[in-house]
Structures are given as C-alpha cells and as structure tokens.
Amino acid sequence: MSLPRDPKSHQFPLRPLTRRRFVTGSLAGVALTACNSGSSRRADSSIKPPEPIPTPSPEPEPIPDTEVTGPMMPRGLHASLIGDSHTSRTVTWFTDGEDAPVSYLEYSSFELGLDEFAIQDDAFEFSVEASTSQTTGIESYTHRASAEGIDPDRPLRYRVGSDEGGWSAVYIVMPSPRDEWSFIHFGDHGTGELAQLVTAEVMRTPADLLMLAGDLSYANGDQPVWDLWFEQMQPLLARRITMAAPGNHEQKDFGGDTFKNRFTHPPKPLTSSFGPSDPGSTFYSFDFNRVHFLVTTAGALIGDGTLPEELLNIEADLASAALRRLRGEIDFIIVMQHFTIWTDQLDRSPANFSLVALEENIFMRYGVDIVIVGHDHVYQRSAPMFLGLPNPLGYVQMMVGTGGASIRLFDDDGPQIWSESTFVGIGFAHYKVSKGKIKIDYIGAPPLDMSDVGREYSQGNFDVLDSVEINAKSILACSQCAMPARGPEILMHNFEAIAAHTRDRNRRALLHCG
C-alpha cells in the first residue's frame, strides 16, 4: 500500500481516551472557557438547539497502530519552527507524572510512495534528546526537540517519547513548498463545539502553515483545559507547522507563563537585555519563503514587563525586513498579534489609542502589507488603511476572531469607512501565496440565527464568503519604506501613557468577556 500524495487524506492514529483525559474533558465541559456574546442571555423556550452535528469521519488510519504504550505517554504533540522553514522542524509535547522520562525525537525523511508499513516500522535515522521543563501550573513536563538539517524536498516521519515512558504514534510533516504555498489564520478558538467545527474544516483545507492569533484554549487559569485543547488539536498540530501569538486570555494563565512554556518559537529578533528568550517567545519573527512574519503581543502580557523591549524589537525587525524587501529577498511583510488595530465589533471601539498610534506609525514607516489579528469574534477585512482611513500605502487588517470561542455582532452604527467586508459567524482565512501575490479567501459558516441563543450554534456549512488579492509593493514604495530603525528616545518618549492605556484596555477586554 502506498502513501497518498495528498497530505490531508492521511491520518495517523489517535491515542485511546484514558481516565485522566476523560475527567479533564468532563471538568472542562462545565467550565466557562470562552467569552460570551457580550450581552446577557435570555431564556427563550421558542429557540431549540439544533440536532447534534455528526462528527466528520476520521481520515484513514495506517496499519498497524504505531503507538507504544507506557506509563508516561507523550501527548499534545505540536510542530513549529525555530529555524529554517525548509530544513528544520521542532516538536513540543507533554508527559504526566512526578518524574520526567529522558525523552527523544526520532525522525527520518522518506520518499513519497514508500510502503506504509515501512513508514511506520523502519528504524529512524536520527534521534535527538529533548529538553525538559516542568509544565506551568500542573503535574506534567514539557519536552521539546528540533530536527535540523532535514531534506527540504522530502516528507519527514517522526515519533517522540522513550522506552521508559512510551512512544507516540508516527506522524508525518510534509516538506515546505517553495514557489506556491498557503497558510491559515484565525484566533479566539477554545474547546467547544463551534471551535471543533472550525478545526475540522481547517483539517480539510490543505495548508503549509497555521498562524494562531491568540486566545487559544480559554483555560483562564484552569490548566487541565490546556491539556484538553492540545488533545483536541493534536491530529492537526502534530502534522502542520503552527506559530502562535498570546492573547488577553493567555495572560490569565500565570501572566502568560503557560503560553511561554507550552509553545516553542524562535528567539526574539534582538539580543535581550533581560536574559535569554523563553522557548515560547511571545514576540518573534521568521521567514517562510518570501514572506517575513513578525509576531507581537500588542501588550497582551504587559504584566511581564517586556513591552518596552518588544517595541524596540518591532522597530528593529521591521526596519531590517523593509531593507531586505528592497534588496529583493522577500515580497511581503506580515504582522500577527491578538489585539485589533481598528474594529467595528459591538462595544469594542479602538481601545488603546496610544499604543495603536505607535504601532500604526511603525507599520506605515516600514510598509507592513498585512496585519492579521483576532480578539473580536467577528470577521472584518479592511481596505489598505492608516489612522482609520483608507490609504493606498497603508496596511490591510484581517480581523479573524472567528475561531469558535463565541459569535458576536457588529456595532449598530455600521462599518467605518476603512471596512471592506464583514461577516458574523465562525471561520478562518486562507492565504495562497505566490511570487508577488497573496490571494486571501475567508472561509466561514453562519450561526443558526442572530439571536443570543442562536449564535451559540452553527450547522458548520462552510463556504468562501470573501476574497481579495494583495500584490507586492512597487520598488518605489519599497525604497520609501527602507528607513533606519529609531531608538528608545523616540519610541519610549510616551511610554507611560502607552502602558497605562494598555493596562486599562486589557482590564476592559476581560470585563467584556463576562
């Protein structure tokens, strides 16, 4: 039997549901794990929940089952990048118990069409010992290891674990295409039915990279909910490179320490004066082919004291990216953060003018092409804009807070002048990248209806609801954006107001969640 060439047609086995996972799931099911619709719920006996939606059929599983059971089984596997997007992969996972086994990442590249039994049973060519740390706030351990120098043109097969604790199933990560590729972006996810509808549709949509714009599990301090979220997401995250930004709900998990512990990201762009980067850096950058990504917190974790350092990193990184774009090394600059710059969601007008003004100044100065965000549980695409007004030299904001945490409404006053497309429901944005061009499709599903109760449900009928094409900037525009980075005397001169407004915004954002 040969391996199908379509990566989304091949699924490796899931672990059996243990008693610990059953209890975790049961407890999380009764916890408040997501923001509500922003208005009080009213009992209405005339509104009936829809019939249960059948879970999509699982993708074909290989034979035989490759999981090797043991007392400290790996769980929550997810792949990311800390190095080159073609020749490296990093895997992070967890084990339970008071003691941590010495764990390994075993991996080999292989040729498409290789017999499935060989893919699963052949000895692995390489083995890397994982680093291990205590998982924040729970009796578990976090392990991470990187496969470096892999063949950029062949799929990677891997497993993680140990003879002492047990081994995961064998997973495959496909090679990163060079010319035409795609990525998916959404934020505000959770563990409920709406979130799982989005996850299932994302799994059906081929993509080479997944960008998560914060507010991921909605654990809000209840750490077993993170375990449930990773359990639900493992079939996707173990096979698709994923990069994440922290949101305001991540701040509730030990000030963001859980996010830093459970994810693995590249180091900060600048050498830190605060010591080495956390493995799960909250602001970082990386290239994927000819697109440069910068991930920021937008002050979501302001309590950790790193916002001044982050603003200097944003400035330096984007200045470098703008110069590289002028030299022809990249085509696009994309910034991801959780908080929106501008919004028309009900009760969520721009809430932090000091930080927004500084961010927009930096984005405009260095010619950022797209800002991908979440936070507001609606979809809204802007025209190229600056300072809340259409501007052909500005950035396009893609607000995709429709990952399934809840479904909200737009302001009664209607969209502002910068807005080009809106949608109420669940869904994600799919970006198809080729040289000098990004075609964006928003793939969404409407709620049952627009009432407070009806917006808690969806039949999951996804379709392409909005499309736009963004072209790379001209050489003239790129030359105007190749500016030297400014120092703290300029960026920090209004920092007291920025910090005060950011704390107030974060406080009101959490109050809005109920």
Image: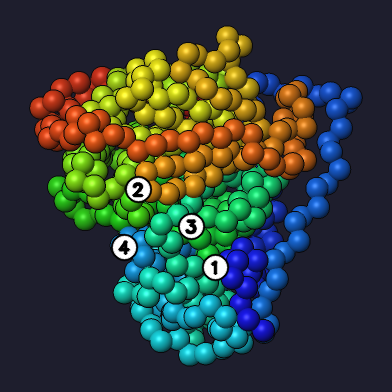
Residue topped by disc 3:
208
Q: Report the mark closest to the observer, 2 or 1.
A: 2
Q: Which mark is residue 84?
A: 4
| Residue 251 occupies quadrant | top left
Q: Earlier in the sequence, mark 1 or mark 3?
A: 1
Q: Earlier in the sequence, mark 4 or mark 3?
A: 4
For this rendering, which residue is in front, 244 or 280? 244
As drawn, is 89 to the left or to the right of 491? right
Task: Check if mark 4's residue and mark 3's residue have beta carbons within 8 Å.
Answer: no
- Depicted 494 relative to depicted 7: above or below: above
Residue topped by disc 2:
291
Residue topped by disc 1:
75
The CA span between labels 4 and 1 is 25 Å
Q: Secondary structure at mark 1?
A: strand
For this rendering, which residue is in front, 141 or 16? 16
Q: Amino acid at mark 1?
A: Arg
Q: Report the mark closest to the observer, 2 or 4.
A: 2
Task: Check if mark 4's residue and mark 1's residue have beta carbons within 8 Å.
Answer: no
Quarter of the figure with the C terminus: top right
Task: Check if mark 1's residue and mark 3's residue have beta carbons within 8 Å.
Answer: no
